[in-house]
Amino acid sequence: MAAPPSTLETTQLLKGVMDLVVLAALSRADGYGYDVVRRLRVAGLGEIGDASVYGTLRRLFSQGLVTSYLIPSDEGPARKYYGLTKLGHKALDAHTTQWNEFAATIGEIVSGDALSSDEALR
Amino acid sequence: MTTMAPSVASFATAVRIAMADLDEPDRVALLDGLEDHLAEIVEENEQPLDVVLGSPEQYAAELRRSAGITARRRTLPPPTIAPPPAPVLSPVRAAVDALATGWWLLRGIGVAFGVGVWTSRDADALSAFPIVPVLDQLWLGPIVLGASVVVSWWIRRLAFAWRAIATLVAVAGLIALSVEVGRTPALVENPTGITMTTVATTIATFSPPPRIEVPNVTGLDIDDAIAVLRSLGFAIEITGGTALDAGIVLTQEPAGGTSLDAGSSIKLGVTTELSATTSTPPPSSPPFTVLVPPLGTTTTGP
């Protein structure tokens, strides 16, 4: 990645949620690989790695969470579109629940609420 | 999109090289459409690819990591590295190796023969060749021979120096034996062990057939001539006329009184009843030739 050192952490953070964000990006509409990259960047993940998205799509495909099909393109060869399978939707739900719990916990930790008691500090 | 920028091609090639160790399905799945995708990125960003994506190696590593392929799948080197060449034996070395299988046997025999020749003073004893006596004792020969072969087999894994010594002994023994054989009259006269009986049998087998005097059969009825000549062991070749039956032998070749090998062919010129009375064969009839083999062959006769 041609990213400044300060964004390395973002890249690290993203690693754990790649499946979640890629599944989420495809949950409303199918899209080809670069579609997913663009959607995620537009949504605010400017640092998301191109190769990360492609590799993740490949892995989700091999796990049966996304399916793929070819759509002829006006400008060049046919594009490979990806879409969620039933399994993919289930996985997205599970990931979302898990993420929400995790994010809430982190939020509490960061806000200091969860660390207010002596017990937690020990 | 129709023309690919060189940077796209080189970037894609570098990525493919970095992924070369992957199994075919993974590689195809991950790299399928890579060039098109890179071209799209170039179009959109209007920046060099390595600025947007990092180095091809980083890109490949990221692709690999996010796809869950952390370790190199194949232990094979990348295809650009040639495998080490297989060791090639020189023809001489290969020939020596091929000989090595039976070499210990030859060596053992040579040593035994050498010992036999050196220890035996009775030259006549060597006439028992290929049994070479030891200490002039014929019965010791095979024993020493067997022991020598066993020892030769036994030492075949020893150091080269030991085997070389044994080999030299064997060569010297064989040379001594050949010299001794050359000096032994019995072996010179009959070095092969073939007896006169076998020679006589061989000669008898291939001896030329006996010569038989040919009788004069001209004037005889053809059937009688055939019977006489066949009983003597001749083959008969009949020419002339139009019909075989009732002919009379006019000519014979060779003439009566000649001696021929049994089985030789005698040509008989015959006439037919017609030609015997008119002396003129029918002009439309072509001359014929009939071969009659001698008695004792596989044919049934005329």
Image (spheres, rainbow, N blue to C red):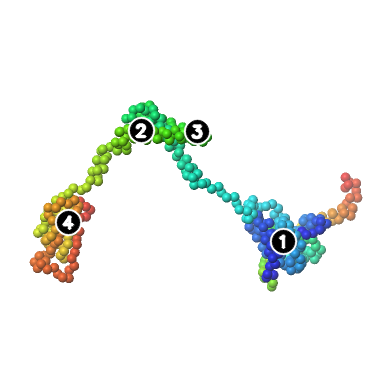
Q: CA distance from mark 1 to mark 3?
A: 70 Å
- Whole-angstrom CA distance, mark 2 to mark 1, is 90 Å
Q: Earlier in the sequence, mark 4 or mark 2?
A: 2
| Residue B162's disc number | 3
**Element under disc 4:** strand
Quadrant where the N terminus of chain B is found in the figure:
bottom right
At horizontal 81% and vertical 63% (from top left) the residue drawn is A44
| Amino acid residing under circle 2 | Glu
Check disc 4 and report the residue beneath it. Answer: B266
Local packing at callout 3 (Cα closer than 10 Å; few below 14, some 14-19, many 20+) is: few
Three-letter residue code for mark 1: Tyr
Residue shown at the point (69%, 72%) measured from the top left? A75
Find the distance from the CA under tag 3 to the CA under tag 4. 74 Å
Q: Which comes sooner in the sequence, label 3 or label 4?
A: 3
> Which chain does the numbered disc 2 sit on?
B
Q: Residue at x 67, y 69 (%)?
A: A77
Q: Closest to the observer: B282 or B299?
A: B282
Label number found at residue B180 = 2
Quadrant position of residue B193: top left
Residue B43 at x, y percent in the picture = 74, 68
Mark 3 vs mark 2, CA separation in Å:
27 Å
